[in-house]
Amino acid sequence: MSRDYELVLLGATGHTGKLAAEHLTKHAPTNLRWALAGRSESKLNSLASDLRALHPDRIQPVVELFELEGPSLTSLIKRTQVIVSTVGPFMKYGTPVVEACARNGTHYVDCSAEIPWHKEMIERFDTIAKASGAIIIPQTGSGSAPPDLTTYLLAAHIRNTYSSGTLQVTSSSELKVQPSAGSMDAVLSEFDIYGSSQMAKCREPFALSPVQHRPLVRPPHLSSWTRLIGVGNDEYLGPLTDFEQSAIDKPLVERSWGLLDDGGLYGPNFQYDELKPARSIWSAFTGHVGYTILMYALSLAPVGWLLRRFSPIAQKDAAEAVKQEFYHNTAVAIADTPNRERAIAKSGFDGSIYLFTGICITEAALTLLRGEETYATRTGGGFLTSATLGHAYIGRLRNVGVRFEIVDDVS
């Protein structure tokens, strides 16, 4: 694919966009042909100057002005191999970009976390993207890519070690991050645009998967009673409770299951759940109650109005708070064998979660551009997932400080 740019970063002057641009400047191949795209020429030129000072001995990014709709967007996308977008909420601003990429054979990655929008984009543009050869991978940010990749790593390990599918992956995630006003706006916009009923449909089992299946038997720590009271207790992970990110990550992992060999890599009985550790059974229960109340409150229009008007979330990162941010995950996989062998994996990143997102989205794009062959590149196009970039993507993330490892096999 011979085009003017290998990579264009949309929303480059936003907080996540700047961090992504800095990561590219430090870690991308020095001969990468890329551009910074946005609507403010002065801000883009200022950022380009800062990046030049950071690494003068590389091809410098070109500044491109564009609007989120119309001829300037289409022209830019036609001249680009991979678009990396940080412009959210994506349900408000992302659709014209995705459509233009799908129609013009341009690959696309973003840091969205909006499952109803993701589902809508698949339904509207998946066939078009397959026809044009565009690889579209939403949700490659720090929230969704790591659990998707960890699950892939475990399933591949079990397949290679035991010649078996994976019965269950239970993921326990800890996340410390200072939320941004933009993240809050995305959550509230989801309720405004799609409503509770459409969001509930996206939480149905395998809602995004191209291959449908109904799990057979739930593990004891994930029974219906456990789900009702919000308390789980895993032999290896300890007390568990609701994890806010699960409603975003679970449909994505289940789509990966369906994409990878029509469920063949993970196995026909695969199930995935994502929770977070709790100090005790009581704290797990109270956490579940609080989460349930919060989700109901966010669905109420007056609550959304109040949060937008009087949001307590800081508009800018506090330096000390960012230093304390982290993402840590431990996941246990059960082999679909008579002996139910287990494998345990850990993944994580210490530092700014928005930097982590910048790393994840740019390394996904570089995997498409400069990486080895992957399932994603073999498919020839369509709406895919981080897991379809496989070990090549995991390897790139490891090289820049993200942890992914199989730590134990338990028979």
Image: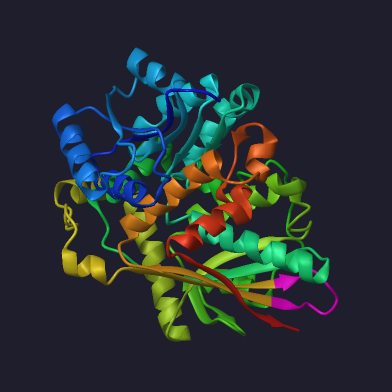
- The reply to whether residue 113 is visible in this rendering is no
The residue lying toward the viewer, choosing from 118 and 27, is 27
Q: Quadrant of the N terminus?
A: top right
Measuring from the top left, give residue 114's x and y in whole percent.
Answer: 44, 44
Measuring from the top left, give residue 119's x and y in whole percent.
Answer: 54, 38
Q: Relative to 27, is 406 above or below?
A: below
Q: Residue at x 47, y 46 (%)?
A: 139
Q: Colour scheme used in the picture?
A: rainbow
Q: Quadrant of the C terminus?
A: bottom right
Measuring from the top left, give residue 260's x and y in whole percent.
Answer: 71, 48
Q: Relative to 145, is 276 above or below?
A: below
Count of numbered circles in the view: 0
The residue lying toward the viewer, choosing from 369 and 287, is 369
Q: Residue furthest top?
A: 71
The residue lying toward the viewer, choosing from 27 and 89, is 27
Q: Residue furthest right?
A: 338
Q: Residue at x 63, y 41 (%)?
A: 376
Q: Residue at x 52, y 39 (%)?
A: 369
Q: Which residues are magenta?
A: 334-342
Residue 79 lies left or right of residue 394; in this view the side is: left
Q: Residue at x 48, y 58 (%)?
A: 397
* Main secondary structure along the magenta-highlighted residues: loop
Q: Relative to 168, is 133 above or below?
A: above
Measuring from the top left, give residue 403's x and y in whole percent.
Answer: 49, 68
Name the image quarter holding residue 49.
top left
Residue 151 lies left or right of residue 49; in this view the side is: right
Q: Residue furthest front?
A: 57
- The reply to whether residue 280 is visible in this rendering is yes
390 part of magenta stretch: no
